[in-house]
Image (spheres, coloured by chain):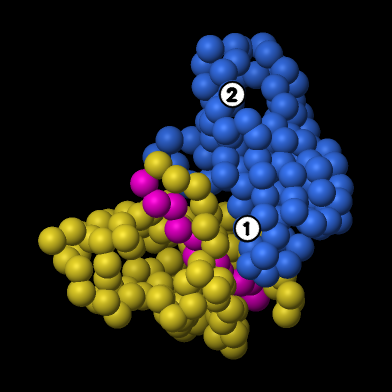
Chain colours: A blue, B yellow
Amino acid sequence: VIWMTQSPSLLSASTGDRVTISCRMSQGISSYLAWYQQKPGKAPELLISAASTLQSGVPSRFSGSGSGTDFTLTISCLQSEDFATYYCQQYYSFPLTFGGGTKVEIK
Amino acid sequence: EVQLVQSGAEVKKPGESLKISCKGSGYSFTSYWIGWVRQMPGKGLEWMGIIYPGDSDTRYSPSFQGQVTISADKSISTAYLQWSSLKASDTAMYYCARLPYCSSTSCFNFDYWGQGTLVTVSS
């Protein structure tokens, strides 16, 4: 099993801030990592696949980087609609696993 | 437009059985995998298992093997998640989601998600 450590679990920020969320793997996964955004009462939505490939329709203020064991999701200029919970997910091997989530809240 | 539409919320008693559904549309249902993901109240996401509706090839997470059954009826583009005997700890939101590809060792990421089915198990 590949264990994932996502940090921080809670991030307080203001509109316009640059925020960074980290996801660390217990073993290397190349670039087989996705990021999802989940708003309260809604299903998760795919933001980024293959560690850095932005999905169609996702604003360019979102970016992903990393490979191997360390990955980062960056939001360059936080907007009001970005306050949500973010999850990383590895798809290098079964069982598919998710990070514990990072809730981005308004400071 | 790709859509996964899940069945409605359920309230059940411990020991009862349940089957929830996920209907796909807007794409070739038999050419993509469907996965199920659990989210317990206030908690994170947990992968339960996957099925390939084209031939009903099924894989389970070790955490859920033997606890649930995943199936599909390709004639009506619908995947299912079922329990034979519910427990209070099965109370959660359950999501189905599409995966473009899976191999014997892993899958691609989930690309489209259903709206979720809330299952409440209480005496």
> How packed is label 2: few (under 14 Cα within 10 Å), some, or many (20 or more)?
some
Q: Amino acid at mark 2?
A: Leu
- At 48% from the left and 35% from the top, the residue drawn is A39
Front residue of A13 and A8: A8
- At 72% from the left and 27% from the top, the residue drawn is A20
Kindly give the residue lying farthest to the bottom in the view shown.
B55
Segment tinted magenta in the rendering = B29-41
- Res A11 label: 2
Q: Amino acid at mark 1?
A: Thr
Residue B13 position by quadrant: bottom left
In the depicted structure, whether residue A104 falls above or below residue A5: above
Kindly give the residue lying farthest to the front in the view shown.
A26
Under circle 1, the secondary element is: strand
B42 drawn magenta: no
Q: CA distance from mark 1 to mark 2?
A: 22 Å
In the depicted structure, whether residue A37 falls above or below residue B115: above
Question: In the drawing, does residue B58 fall left or right of residue A64?
Answer: left
Residue A78 position by quadrant: top right
- At 55% from the left and 67% from the top, the residue drawn is B35
Front residue of B9 and A98: A98
Whole-percent x and y of residue B119? 29, 58
Under circle 2, the secondary element is: strand
What is the count of numbered marks? 2
Name the chain under label 1. A
Whole-percent x and y of residue A86? 59, 37
- Res A76 label: none
Whole-percent x and y of residue B117? 36, 57
Residue annotated with mark 1:
A97
In the depicted structure, whether residue B122 falls above or below residue A83: below
Quadrant containing the C terminus of chain B in the rendered view: bottom left
- At 67% from the left and 55% from the top, the residue drawn is A3
